[in-house]
Amino acid sequence: MKKILTSIIALALATVAHAATINVTVFSTRYQTITGFGAACCDGAMCPFGTDTQPVKLLYGPQSKIGLNIMRMEISPNFKGDINASDIGWDTPYDWQGSVPSAKIVKQRGGIVFGTPWSPPGEYKTNGTAAGGNSEEQGYQRGELREDCYEKFFPWLNTFLKYMKSKGVAVDAVSIQNEPDWWVNYSGCLYTPEQQLKLVKNYAQMLDRETYKGVRLISAEPLGFDPKYSDALMKSAPARKQIDIIAGHLYGHPPLGNMKEAATLASKYGKEVWMTEHSVTDNIDHLPTWHEQLIFAEELNECMLAGCTGYIYWYMRAHWAFVGTGEAKYNPGNTKNKLLPRAYVMSHFSKHVTGSTRLGVKSNVTTGTNSYFETSAYIKGDSLIVMAIDTTKNAFDLNLRLPFKVKSGTHLLSTSNESLCQETPIAIDEPVQELTVYMPERSLNTYIFMIERGTGIQEVPQNTKRNSSGRRYFDLQGRQLNTPQGLCVEQNADGSSRKVYIDK
């Protein structure tokens, strides 16, 4: 037995030793800062809606295993019934109470809550109903916001903000519309890019930002992140002033297509970019396989590479989502209100990438949508984070070339639905700027390194300004300082640098 075990270990070591090498270079060039990750709390898979708060308790906050921090809810256009709201003590006639219990918990845990209208009230629309218009009963009449009701739209959103505030939830943002380019027979409203522009340009100032301080306005969220919707807003100075976040969904269009195109112009004007709804394997008739989980991880990674600052999944509870439903046909493995493997895949990003700034990265492997290998990198405080995804049956060595010296590290590894988020230390004897780490086959990897303070600047960030003497100053993590003070790095016009202490 001992001889057999020794042979197995030797074979494993030989396999690791002969793994092909992928070279990855991380630069200090900085891109977007990541606001966070989340999911939707809407009627449907969340039933009993409004009373079961276990999903958000499992998923949200730094104390949770998953670390989500953004929750999406519907701003419903539906009345609670034919009974007059005032007769039974309701303080709003609209069906907004369902998400309140979950929203309270998210806010208590430091999270962000935003609301999306599926439709304005039916009486504001061309077809007289909250439904979108894609049904024979409505005569297939386009359900659009009537132009004479444009001035009612933002006061209606203010009513939602007032209601939520009265329930103890300070809503952080509101959107214009869910999927303005998609005909539906459920709640929906169609807008062209030009109609959305007119609404925002002429009426968005009616959103009561004074009373509801800090509330931000999100663009309409097109089905496939069609950049025509956000580009029209960004190219108009009055509309651009009103919009804080551009948003969209990924149905039919992967992140490195429409989303990346939309983000290019939005980021030029300092706007955040949120992916506000998608499910990679929505409504599948089985629990997701590990390969499908890796495809989901690649979508998260590609969204970051596209310039995304917030990623919000669809339902938080579904057999293809983060928390089990208990439906017998999807068991075993779908226990109600238990975390599913997809939640742990999300946690690689939500627990570690939230609050970080993406860094430039390149490898000697050509990557794109659903490539066999993908990577990205981030900096957060003294942590340098490298994500790596391998969808093949082959293991690889990653030769990492980093912008700063690192002194210690941790490898967070997921290799199957049964083997998730295993942590092991990365042995580093002395501070290094280049090292090799192991990436198993079919794996999702997060490598977290601690930056060695005082190592100086190894690469100068792009688009930085020099003072009159031609010198630039940075802190020890590579961030340029407008007013240098204390211990910092002074870089001369010739590119040489030294640590200096400036006493002001």
Image: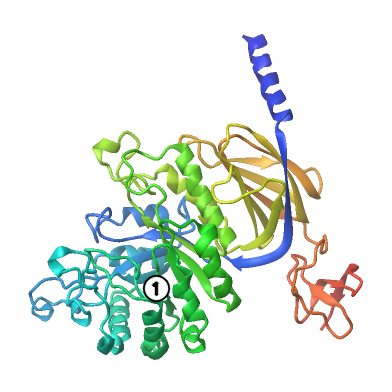
Is residue 447 found left or right of 427 in the rendered image? left
Which image quarter: residue 365? top right
Residue 72 image offset from top left, x and y in percent = 37, 65
Is the residue 428 above or below the residue 483 in the image? above
Q: Quadrant of the C terminus?
A: bottom right
Q: Which colour scheme is used?
A: rainbow
Is residue 421 found left or right of 501 in the rendered image? left
Q: Residue at image x 72%, y 24%?
A: 14
Residue 59 image offset from top left, x and y in percent = 41, 54
Q: In which quarter of the image is the N terminus?
A: top right
Is the residue 23 above or below the residue 195 in the image? above
Front residue of 184 and 159: 184
Which image quarter: residue 124? bottom left
Badge 1: residue crowd in 10 Å (few <14, some 14–19, many ≥20): many
Q: For mark 1, give the secondary structure.
A: loop
Q: Name the residue under label 1.
A: 220
Front residue of 481 and 262: 262
Asked whether the viewer can see residue 388, the reply is no
